[in-house]
Image (spheres, rainbow, N blue to C red):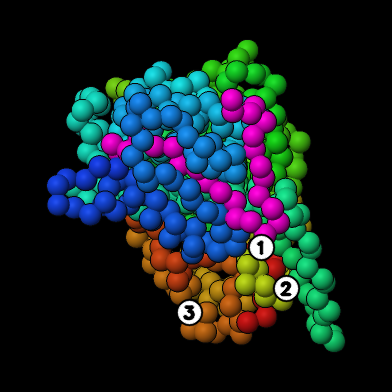
Amino acid sequence: MYEEQFHIPPGPDDPVQIFVSYAHDDNSVPPGLEPEKGFVAVLISHLEYILTRRGHPRPKIWWDQRRIDKADRFDNIIQEAIKRSSLLLVVMSTNWLSRPWCRRELELFAKRQDSTEHMVLVRANHVEPAEHPGELQNIQGYDFFSLDDWREPGNERFFVDQGEICDKLFTKHVSELGSVVWRRASNVRRKIVPPQPPPPLAPASGAKISPLREPRTIYLAKPAPDTAVVYDRIANDLMREGYQVVPPIGENIPAESAARALQFVDSALESAEASIHLLGDKPGYKPDELDHIVPLQLARAGERAKLRPTNPNGARFTRIVWAPKSPEDDCRFPAATLREPITVLDRFDHHCEGDQLYGDVFSAFQSYLKRELERRVPPSRTESIEQESSGSRIYVWHRKDDREFARKVRKWLRDHDAEAILPGNDEDPDRDKLHRQNLADCSAVFLCWAQATDVWAKMSASQLRSWRDLGRKERFSVRGLVLGPPPGESKSEDDMPLPSEIDEVLDLSHDNQLMLDRLQQLLDRSRVSHVR
């Protein structure tokens, strides 16, 4: 009889072991191909490569390559491997569901405490969620196939077929899978051997050392089905940029307990400096006695935003919401007309002060998100030496059409103890001379673009490309582009000035209430000078 208490954690010098539960038919190959060309073999070989590149602590993958017939016993080799494995990778398929010993592997692993946190799910072909075993119901998993527009089982387009990788999404998904597995193995290792803090470095004589920066953590809200593909793309982008994504990508919000669901969401939010929410049409599944997951996460993030906590770099916690105006290939929802982002948000939760609300196409949102996260910290990611410059002067540059908008920006800056300067009167003959002087003398420039044309914005930004040509002694601390209402196609990502001309873009074009507090981070950056 197999023992109930069977898990043997790895020793201090042992690798963390991953047990792969799969049906051998999912590793079959056409006649004439080598065995290592099967789907499971290709998946594991790529996963081992990614884990090798990740380095210490390098987990070990265990998978049984023998053929076990239905009549064979569930032997001691399998039992011992499960006993010594800390993570379970299930390759779900219709074949897997029909194999009693595959289900037995899951049942044995699930007996241990908090087993769901140590399970990862891969789907080799389409299995309806309702058919998943109960232990796997709340695990999001990774699909290694795509369906046609009718989403009919049997019409899957496999990422690995006939021994060949035939879809570039295979590489993307296996990379994300490798990251999740490696992080979970690292968590197992940390519980066994807690990391020791490195000894402090002695500063060189007279040198000013910037404080060590904590890893930046972003809460990426668990999606409803209609935004799941977009969720994967955002998660991949964030990890590629070096952010830590919480909650873990392969884990879903517990559905069976309200207390566990809230603890799952709140503990992840507590470590994050911002939350990202992707709003399609669906609210997602509903945990026990709670709201659906999409409004639930918005509400919990909104409560955290009200506390106005700051991250180690001084940026306040905020919600970043993407509510696209129309459906896209990767985000499908019914829409007879264009949606208003604020109206979409109101369907799921109320608007909070400081919300970053975006309704443009996904590609533009990706670029916006990258800028938004980068501007939340002072531009010192290269550990440059910094010093505050309280005497900074900001040139609020605008065209005549946008004088009212620019004056509101200047008033906000002055209310926050900044010296802000507007251009001279349009009819004054010395206006151009004053303009050149402001560009040469002011420490920062905020280019205000609301009613003016995109041609004016691009021509103006091009003047900021070379600080030496302006007669300056040093670079601008920041060249900011502030977009005001109304929104328009000319203000999309594709029509923005070049990065060599503008450092930061602050998009207020969709904000009819002009919540100018978002200028704070541009102001903070304008007050930082760099030794170059």
Proximity of marks 2 and 1: CB atoms separated by less than 8 Å? yes
Q: Position of residue 148 (x, y in %)?
A: 21, 32
Query: In terms of depth relative to the viewer, which is nearer, 239 or 2?
Result: 2
Mark found first going from the N terminus, 2 or 1: 1
* Residue depicted at 64% across the width and 18% down the height: 257
Proximity of marks 2 and 3: CB atoms separated by less than 8 Å? no
Residue 21 included in the magenta stretch of the image: yes
> Is residue 226 found left or right of 395 in the rendered image?
left
Mark found first going from the N terminus, 1 or 3: 1
Crowding around mark 1 (Cα neighbors within 10 Å: few <14, some 14 to 19, many 20+) is: some
Relative to 142, does residue 413 appear above or below in the rendering?
below
- What label does residue 386 carry, if any? 2
Q: Amino acid at mark 3?
A: Ser
Query: In terms of depth relative to the viewer, which is nearer, 152 or 498?
Result: 152
Is residue 14 in sight in this rendering?
A: yes
Q: Position of residue 128 (x, y in %)?
A: 35, 22
- What label does residue 378 carry, if any? 1
